[in-house]
Image (spheres, rainbow, N blue to C red):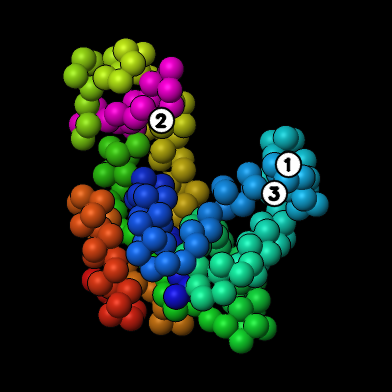
Amino acid sequence: MRIVLVGPPGAGKGTQAAYLAKNLSIPHISTGDLFRANISRGTDLGVQAKGYMDAGNLVPDEVTIAMALERMGQPDAANGFLLDGFPRNVSQAEALDKALTAEGLHLDAVLDLEVDEDEVVKRIAGRRICRNDSSHVFHVTYSPPKKQGVCDECGGELYQRDDDSEETVRTRLEVYHTQTEPIIDHYREQGLVVTISALGKVAEVTERAMAALEEGGRAA
């Protein structure tokens, strides 16, 4: 299957992408991984992306699109892929449509993870990270540490990242609504959008997503 995964920040896209890709035996392709891989390998596209990023600028659509298309052309993606973070806007979606059509291919579904905005803020603003090891993550409501402000694993100080503050989260949500959400309408016109609730335990959301994908485009 060829799937695009969309949803606001805090919807759990990265987590669901990993589980879904494994269940469907297709590669999980994220823009973050693409940037890191190309930059670390020193590819032409990576050099271009790094130049923009180092200058504090957004990587242009044409560079992001080229990276994504190159990755989708690799052997492990021959039978499908799951795109996470791409396309990010309508122009990227149109470029993807054009590229797939040129190869005689098409998307099978666009999985929209739906979650209330206040829940997104609660999820992200409640995260606390260990200063000693960023892989130690807690949440003031959902997975609080045994001792407030102290990591259960190593005793390190827990803190809230600047980009996890409520103000920053709401700004990120506005960017999502303005730039990325319109691709849902773009794909809805093609009958590809499958919308599911992203609330509940990880396994429950994965099961919900798999069932919706198997139903072939009907909302769940």
Q: Which is nearer the N-term, disc 3 or disc 2? A: 3
Name the element at disc 1.
helix
Apparent side of residue 190 relative to residue 70 in the rendered image (left or right):
left
Residue 112 percent coordinates (x, y): 37, 64
Residue type, mark 2 in image: Ser
Work out how far the residue at label 2 is from the one at label 1, CA to CA, in angstroms: 25 Å
Q: Which is nearer the N-term, disc 2 or disc 1? A: 1
Position of residue 127 relative to residue 189, above or below, is above
Of badges 2 and 1, nearer the viewer stands 2
Q: Residue at 34% x, 79% y: name it.
A: 217
Q: Which is nearer the N-term, disc 3 or disc 1? A: 3
- Whether residue 188 appears in this view of the structure is no
Q: Quadrant of residue 105?
A: bottom right
Q: Quadrant of the N terminus?
A: bottom left
Name the element at disc 2.
loop
Residue type, mark 3 in image: Asn
Q: Which mark is residue 50?
A: 1
Q: Residue at 40% x, 57% y: name it.
A: 17
- Whether residue 84 appears in this view of the structure is yes
Residue 138 falls within the magenta-colored stretch: yes
Label 3, on which residue? 38
Position of residue 149 relative to residue 40, above or below, is above
Over which residues does the magenta segment extend?
125-141
Q: Residue at 39% x, 61% y: name it.
A: 22
Of 56 and 202, which appears nearest the observer? 202
Label 2: how many residues lie within 10 Å, few (<14), some (14-19) or many (20+)? few
Q: Residue at 26% x, 44% y: name it.
A: 119
